[in-house]
């Protein structure tokens, strides 16, 4: 797609809006529809769109494989740590009430961090799946 200058310029603008919308969905998920899963898919879709327009090697330079794999592990770890924090503070696993003196504030903090972990994990998994399938049989693929 190197010959399509207009498409490449428009894609950069759309990708920026997609990433901002992913953040909106992430932070709006505490109070309405949305949350970590939807935001993670939107963020990953923006990188996948980038790969379609600029090529898989360019996308792997923007979001390298090591970062994608770290995202998957870090998101799950963040999710688990929120649960363990609830246990260490005297509650049950993923019991958010104990995360703050005010139970409502504790709920808000717990949901925020769990949704952040889901966002990071979902975005990483979606990109990992795309990288594996898009790089299948290509020489520039770093996967076995």
Image (cartoon, rainbow, N blue to C red):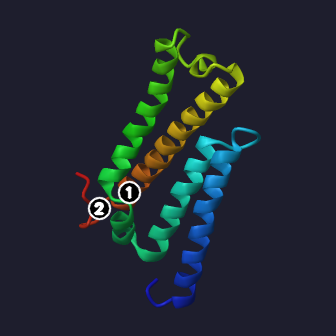
Hey, which quadrant is residue 133 in on the image?
bottom left
Q: Is residue 35 placed above or below 21 in the rendered structure?
A: above
Residue 62: quarter of image? bottom left
Residue 86 location (% of width, % of height)? 52, 17
Q: Earlier in the sequence, mark 2 or mark 1?
A: 1
Nearer mark to the viewer, of 2 and 1: 1
25 with respect to 52 (left or right): right
Image coords of residue 30 (percent x, y): 70, 38
Whether residues under marks 2 and 1 lie with C-beta atoms below 8 angstroms apart, the answer is: no
Neighbours of disc 2 within 10 Å: few (<14), some (14-19), many (20+): few
Q: Position of residue 64 (x, y in %)?
A: 33, 59
Q: What is the number of callouts on the image?
A: 2
Q: Give the residue at x 36% y 53%.
A: 132
> In front: 113, or 45?
113
Badge 1: residue crowd in 10 Å (few <14, some 14–19, many ≥20): many
Residue 131: assigned label: 1
Front residue of 42/29: it is: 29
Local secondary structure at mark 2: loop
Is residue 104 shown left or right of residue 72? right
Query: Residue 45, relative to residue 94: is it above or below?
Result: below
Residue occupying image coordinates x 55% and y 34%: 113
Picture residue at 44% right of the left edge, 26% below the top? 81
Asked which secondary structure carries label 1, the reply is helix
Q: Give how far apart the Cα atoms at labels 2 and 1 are.
A: 12 Å
**Mark number, residue 137:** 2
Residue 111, labelled with which disc?
none
Tell me where residue 118 appears, x and y as whole percent: 53, 38
* Furthest residue in direction right, as rendered: 32
Apparent side of residue 94 relative to residue 97 in the rendered image (left or right): left
């Amino acid at each position: 797609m190197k010959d399509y200058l207009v498409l490449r310029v428009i894609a950069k603008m759309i990708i920026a809006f997609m990433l901002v919308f992913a953040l909106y969905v992430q932070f709006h998920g505490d109070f309405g529809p949305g949350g970590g899963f939807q935001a993670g898919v939107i963020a990953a879709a923006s990188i996948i769109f980038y790969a379609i327009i600029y090529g898989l090697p360019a996308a792997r330079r923007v979001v390298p494989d090591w970062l994608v794999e770290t995202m998957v592990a870090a998101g799950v770890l963040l999710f688990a740590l929120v649960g363990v924090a609830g246990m260490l503070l005297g509650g049950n696993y993923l019991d958010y009430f104990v995360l703050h003196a005010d139970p409502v504030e504790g709920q808000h903090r717990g949901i925020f961090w769990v949704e952040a972990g889901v966002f990071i994990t979902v975005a990483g998994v979606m990109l990992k799946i795309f990288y594996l399938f898009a790089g299948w049989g290509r020489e520039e693929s770093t996967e076995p």
